Image (spheres, rainbow, N blue to C red):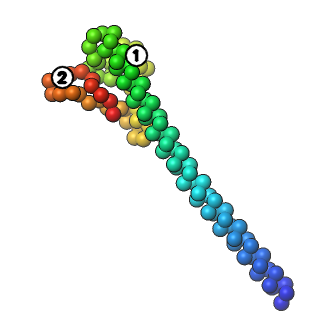
Amino acid sequence: MELAIQTGNSDRWKVGVRFGLLLAMVVVTMKCQTWTKRTKETLKVNKLFTLRTWIDEYTFDRQRAPRTIEDLVDSGYLRSVPRDPFTGKALSISLPGRGKQDVFDVR
């Protein structure tokens, strides 16, 4: 009987360790997801700031705003159209009004 009791305690200890490891893995996974999201948010903010800066430079140099983001690429201000880190799609532009054809803002 003593042997059975010792084996039972050993099994409980193993279950406790396994549960602790599982809990630790869940916590680490949740933290990694949070870090990944924050990294993508920071990357997107940085890309938008850079794009707005190059739009301003283009506007200052040419005395008019670019008509599309591709104008920035074609004139050498950007190597390629920046992509949204969440969706993978190219960043889009918004125009100030119906009659206007120049880039106003990016999102």
Q: Where residue 22 sits: x, y (%)?
A: 63, 63
User: Which badge, 2 or 1, is on the more N-terminal residue?
Assistant: 1
Q: Which mark is residue 50?
A: none
Spatial CA span between label 2 and label 1: 22 Å
Asked whether, in this view, residue 6 is left or right of residue 65, the answer is right
* Residue sitting at x 51%, y 39%: 39
Amino acid type of the residue tagged 1 in the rendering: Tyr
Amino acid type of the residue tagged 2 in the rendering: Lys
Image quadrant containing the C terminus: top left
Relative to 37, say whether 11 is above or below: below
Residue reaching furthest left? Answer: 99
Relative to 23, say whether 3 is above or below: below
**Image quadrant in which you'd find residue 98:** top left
Asked whether, in this view, residue 50 is left or right of residue 34, the answer is left
Q: Where residue 105 sits: x, y (%)?
A: 30, 28
Is any atom of residue 72 visible in this view?
no
**Image quadrant in which you'd find residue 58:** top left
Q: Where residue 81 sits: x, y (%)?
A: 39, 26
Q: Where residue 25 sits: x, y (%)?
A: 62, 58
Mark 1, secondary structure of its residue: loop
Q: Residue 77 carries which label?
A: 1
Is any atom of residue 102 visible in this view?
yes
**Image quadrant in which you'd find residue 72:** top left
**Nearer to me, 40 or 71:** 40
* Residue sitting at x 27%, y 25%: 104
Q: Which residue is label 2 attached to?
A: 100
* Residue sitting at x 24%, y 21%: 102
**Nearer to me, 93 or 46:** 46
**Nearer to me, 10 or 53:** 53
Residue reaching furthest right? Answer: 2
Relative to 37, say whether 93 is above or below: above
